[in-house]
Amino acid sequence: MTTTTIHPTPEAVVAFAANLRGDLIRAGDDAYDDARKLYNAMIDKRPAFIARCQDVTDVMTAIAFAREVGLPLAVRGGGHNGGGLGSVDDGLVIDLAAMDGVRVDPEARTVRVEGGATWGKVDHAAHAFGLAVPSGIISTTGVGGLTLGGGLGHLTRRHGLTIDNLLEVDVVLADGRLVTANEHEHRDLFWAVRGGGGNFGVVTSFLFRAHPVETVVGGPTLWSLDDAADVLRWYRDFIRAAPRDLTGFFAFLTVPPAPPFPEHLHRRKVCGIVWCYSGPSERADEVFAPVAAFGTPLLHGVHPMPFPALQSAFDALHPAGLQWYWRADFFDELSDEAIAAHVEHAAQLPTMLSTMHLYPIDGAAHDVADDATPWSYRDANWAQVIVGIDPDPAMAEPLADWAKAYWAALHPHSSGGAYVNFMMDEGQERVRATYRDNYPRLARIKATYDPENLFRVNQNIEPKN
């Protein structure tokens, strides 16, 4: 497919800028290079314009400009997207970062969040009232991208995916209208945004159900890499039988050379599980007893902490501007053959920050039917992500090669699709495999709300009636 670069007239650009409350940054402006930077520095895109929207009217104005002059359009919230899908070459980026308000209703146990907020802002605001919204594991992640793709993390087994706790959204559509979607209004749109990504419009406001989660017992248990096969076999059975208020994601990692890790473990390749127990504190010792007793842990660093402390524990390890390469899959089971492949490729971790995470997505996430939301893998038990990470651009190719080889070895054991928030720009076949039987319904809703596919810089669902 060939593309044509659009050059709006200078008069149109001046009028657009004048109608924005926020700033319009153009290629060549002093702020341009900083404004166009992506979280994943492996991806370098050069949009023609970046609209730093201040409010919903700015979003409506930006969408109208892109539609009327024919510019490709991307939407950026927190900017964490692995595939760099929050930007677009020679097009317009709608940057929502300034729209980051959070309002908690402690009596209703709801949280209203603007589209540019990060989860750290939500965690901070909700924690003051002893509440939390199920989200991910890094607090600098944007609320919008994580939610629209599904949302899995420390509270998934107990309280479900983020989309399972979404009550309402305000959306600016491709035709410029602002609509509210919930179980009573625009129900088809509300169904679609709960996992269908940014395909249907720009979500400027989310309303979430919050839960009483204040202090959790969490942290890592680490074992020698030599014990990885035994740990994985134990883990696959233990976590499935564990109470829902306990979760833990498995990881291969290199121990960071910094506190709180003891010096003798610094830079050592290990396997581990990062735990989060959100149940009654008096039961924590009982719940963790089998964990501490299994094998010979190198470290059992589990202790009480405020939930936002666990949510932000990995922020310093993953600042913006690193090289990232992601590959992902869902898994129903962890066979012995799959475990052997994990162990083989984990021994080849290419850099200190590179890792593999295996997130349990059973428990409350299984209580929802496959067709109740676009997330079609309600029967899957794990979401896997393989991530090559390093600050050095010279490592980009080795990171990608390692992740691709690891993924190729595990994919035959997978369920077929992957969590869209863990995917690079991998094409239509992977998108269809992720939504399975829900894809045709998504395509019909896309045709209703975005028939010209204005919102296509994403894990794209092509409109089709």
Image (cartoon, grey):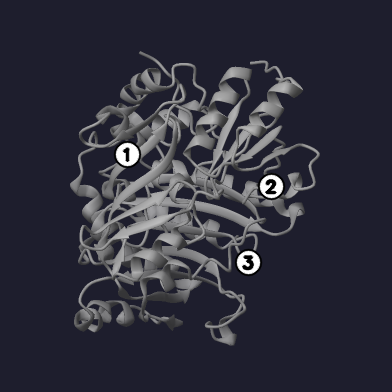
Residue 441 in sight here: yes
Marks 2 and 3, the one that precedes in the sequence? 2
Residue 356 located left or right of residue 280: right
Looking at the rendered image, the quarter that the C terminus falls into is top left
Q: Which residue in the protein does label 2 denote?
A: 35
Q: Tell me the residue that label 1 is attached to.
A: 375
Label 3: which secondary element: loop
Q: Is mark 1 on a helix, strand or loop?
A: loop
For badge 1, the amino acid type reads Trp
Q: Identify the mark at residue 323; answer none if there is no mark.
A: none
Q: Splitting the image into 4 quarters, where does residue 149 fall?
A: top left
- Residue drawn at x 52%, y 58% as measured from the top left: 344
Q: What residue type is labelled 3?
A: Met
**CB of mark 1 within 8 Å of CB of mark 3?**
no
Which residue is nearer to you in this view: 411 or 448?
448
In this rendering, is residue 91 above or below 275? above
What residue sits 58% from the left and 62% below the top? 318
Q: Is residue 332 found left or right of 58 in the rendered image?
A: left
Identify the mark at residue 352; answer none if there is no mark: 3
Q: Where is residue 390 in the image (x, y as percent from the top left)?
A: 67, 59
Front one among 149 and 379: 149
Mark 2 to mark 1: distance in Å?
A: 32 Å
| Residue plotted at (22% across, 72% down) | 279
Q: For numbered disc 2, what is the local secondary structure?
A: helix
Nearest the camera: 351 or 171?
Answer: 171
Q: Nearer the viewer, mark 1 or mark 3?
A: 1
Q: In which quarter of the image is residue 376?
A: top left
The tag earlier along the polypeptide, 1 or 3, is 3
| Tally of marks | 3
The three-letter code of the residue at mark 2 reads Ala
* Circle 2 or circle 1, nearest the eye: 2
Residue 108 vertical position relative to residue 14 in the rendered view, above or below: below
